[in-house]
Amino acid sequence: MSKRFLNDDFFESMESSIIEIKDAESLPPLCYTDREFFEFEKEAIFNHEWLCVGRTDWVPNKGDFFTTSIVNEPVVVVHDRDGEIRAMSSVCQHRAMLVAEGSGNTRTFTCPYHHWVYSLKGDLINAPAMEKTCNFHKEDSGLPQFKLELWHGFIFINLDNDAKPLTPRLAALEPILANYDIENTEGPDADKNIKYDFSWKVMFENNNDGYHANRLHHGEFHDYIPSELAAFPDELPEDTAGYFRTNGTLHKDASFNPTQKALMPVFPKLNEEERNRMAFANLPPSLSLVLTSDAVIYLILRADGPESHYLDLGVLFAKGAMAEPDFDVNMEQVIERALDINAQDVHVDEMVQIGLRSRYAPRGRYSWQEGAQRQFNTWLVPRYRALWEQMKAKQDKAQ
Ligand code: FES
């Protein structure tokens, strides 16, 4: 990696993105556009943080699997014969064909190219016509395994086998999530592999930006969830893996659909306070949750380059909601509104990405209603800084 701009000045300049919101400014624009920075970011974040890749209800039965990828790493997640959910590389250890595509149910993964066969645990169990090959041992050629952790029904993997567990570092989010009982929700199939040509960070910031809510989406889309009622928690624990904000609503049980009120059953454990606000929980770099009285919207972001990412978008409802007689009709209304709001967001995100490439791209100042952007910066910058310090130490040692 060359160090065109990776230097002490560059990382020191990021300090102004994590100070108090009244004084803070956004990150340097090249953090959103530059290939070299993305390679740095992969090591600072994606190679060591927990990455959400899906939900347990995508693989309910033994033999069920789905494939995905993040930072161009092909992954297969499978519910194995012992009932365990595991994640592994889908790259065949012969000549790198992918042993699985899409999703389905299977007893083994047979590579279509030369028919090497892997068990659902990733062991290589058959490799035809390899008996004359010297020093070839099937047990050395299993599919590489990823660390995996489950959290509220979400499946997280880690590309770093020494990574610290995720769940203990999410304690700050538990009080906000508890009454939605997300583990016991249900929902229609997620809309997967939506490709966007803008940075994963632009998407992450937009998902959680209360400042634009009743401005970009003014009118019937969002006025009942006004930016003025945004609230941000006091300082979160330093090692937290996620953060959240809340936003008050102008009426109880507000929800995103043309009626502006819950159409699906309200999550039964929610208290009065929770029914009069929405909450936004974020687990960078890959999961963003929008919590309303009758729906939990989840966005799984899968970066594949500095200026592009894939999105898996799903919605969860209280148990039993999908059996309600009006479910399909109500769902149509939810989708209609979601598409309208999403079209406005995506247009802005695409234009922001163009703006970020400009020589005039700013390090912009924040409104108090953008506290979540500072929260995001506070999550990112120490991780960038830590890798930079490691790189410098390594360099010093080598000299
Ligand atoms: Fe998979 Fe050859 S690449 S069997």
Image: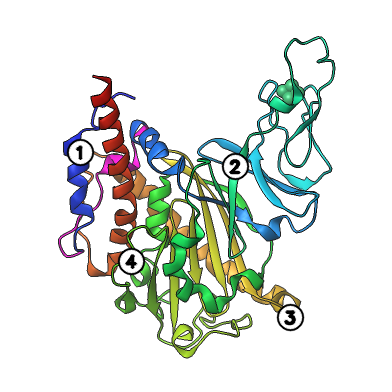
Q: How dense is the environment of label 3, judged by Cα within 10 Å: few (below 14), some, or many (20 and up)?
A: few
**Residue in the picture at 65% in, 72% down:** 185
**Quarter of the image where one finds residue 298:** bottom right
The CA distance from mark 1 to mark 2 is 33 Å
The CA distance from mark 3 to mark 1 is 55 Å
SS at mark 1 in the image: helix
- Kind of residue indicated by mark 1: Phe
Question: Which residue was labeled with disc 1?
Answer: 10
The CA distance from mark 2 to mark 4 is 29 Å
Looking at marks 3 and 1 on the same chain, the residue that comes earlier in the sequence is marked by: 1
| Numbered badge on residue 236 | 4
Whether residue 171 can be seen here = yes
| Numbered badge on residue 146 | 2
User: Where residue 96 appears, x then y in whole percent?
Assistant: 66, 24
SS at mark 4 in the image: loop
**Residue in the picture at 41% in, 68% down:** 172
SS at mark 3 in the image: loop
State which region is magenta: 21-35
- Kind of residue indicated by mark 3: Glu
- Kind of residue indicated by mark 2: Phe
Question: In the visual, does 369 lie left or right of 314?
Answer: left
**Quarter of the image where one finds residue 282:** bottom left
**Residue in the picture at 32% in, 61% down:** 375
User: Where residue 120 appears, x then y in whole percent?
Assistant: 76, 42
Whether residue 196 can be seen here = no
Question: In the visual, does 378 lie left or right of 324?
Answer: left
Q: Is residue 26 magenta?
A: yes
